Image (spheres, rainbow, N blue to C red):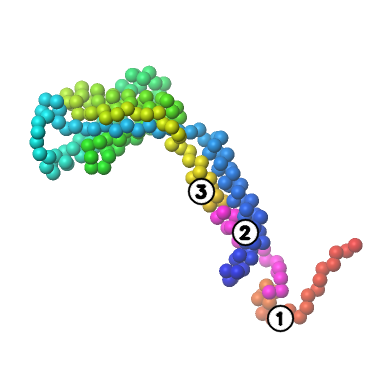
Amino acid sequence: MEIKEYFKILNKRKLMVIAITLSCALLSAVVSYFVIKPVYKSEIKVAIDANTASDKTEKKQDYQDVIMYQKLVKSYSKYATSRVVIKDVIKELNLSLTEDELINMISVAPEGDTEFLAISVKSKDKYEVSKITDQLALSLKNVTKKIKNADNVQLIDAATVPAKPDSPKPALNIAIAFVIGLMLSVGLVFLLEYLDNTVKDEEELKKILGCSVLGVIPVFEEK
């Protein structure tokens, strides 16, 4: 089958392609704007300082210091989602959440090879999410200070109230739905064409029989 014939098949059922594609995009828009509840994200960064107040001295950092910092930051990322820290956050903010629910809202990760730890929280309440993020950093500082007898967590700044939802992303969802709808509609068109075994014109009949068409009997509507 030549490319020209592919376009001919699509053109024959172009209304179906347009209808299915637009329907998918419209459905995605309705779901994104009216069905899915927006989720907000707040983030804060804390610095993990290996030198405590008692032993802070001027010294050169070598390779071993860098490795030690990286391990320390990874260790504190585990502390941030530990039960003891989570319990402290729930207690201080008087949250009506279980420990597992709060843990699932939290994401903690080291910032590359730096001494910074990125803490982010997702919630459907845009005002609550910033409070939880701030308290999580503070609880991490207070709890680890008691456990390790060292104040290694340095709070840099406060979390801000998110201006817009982190998800859903309607524009992205609509674009994806549009592409999926287009692919589905095109696939359906070629499937229907494959299942249709009727002869539609003289050219197709020539290909099937391998001989020329001598004449065509027209169809008259009965009056």
Residue 201 vertical position relative to residue 49 in the rendered view, above or below: below
Q: Main secondary structure of the magenta part?
A: helix
| Left or right, 52 with reference to 202 | left
The N terminus is located in which quarter? bottom right
Disc 2 to disc 1: CB gap under 8 Å? no
Q: Quadrant of the C terminus?
A: bottom right
Amino acid type, residue under disc 3 in the picture? Ile
Please name the residue shown 38% across and 32% down the image: 42
Secondary structure of the residue carrying numbered label 2: helix
- The residue located at (27%, 39%) in the rendering is 111
Q: Given contact means CB atoms under 8 Å apart, are the residues at marks 3 and 1 in contact?
A: no
User: What span is colored magenta in the figure?
Assistant: 182-203
Give x and y (percent) for residue 136: 32, 26
Residue underneath mark 3 = 176
> Could you give the CA–CA distance between mark 3 and mark 2, rounded to whole angstroms?
20 Å
Q: Give the mark nearer the N terminus: 2 vs 1.
A: 2
Q: Position of residue 135 (x, y in %)?
A: 32, 24
**Residue at left offset 42%, top offset 25%:** 127
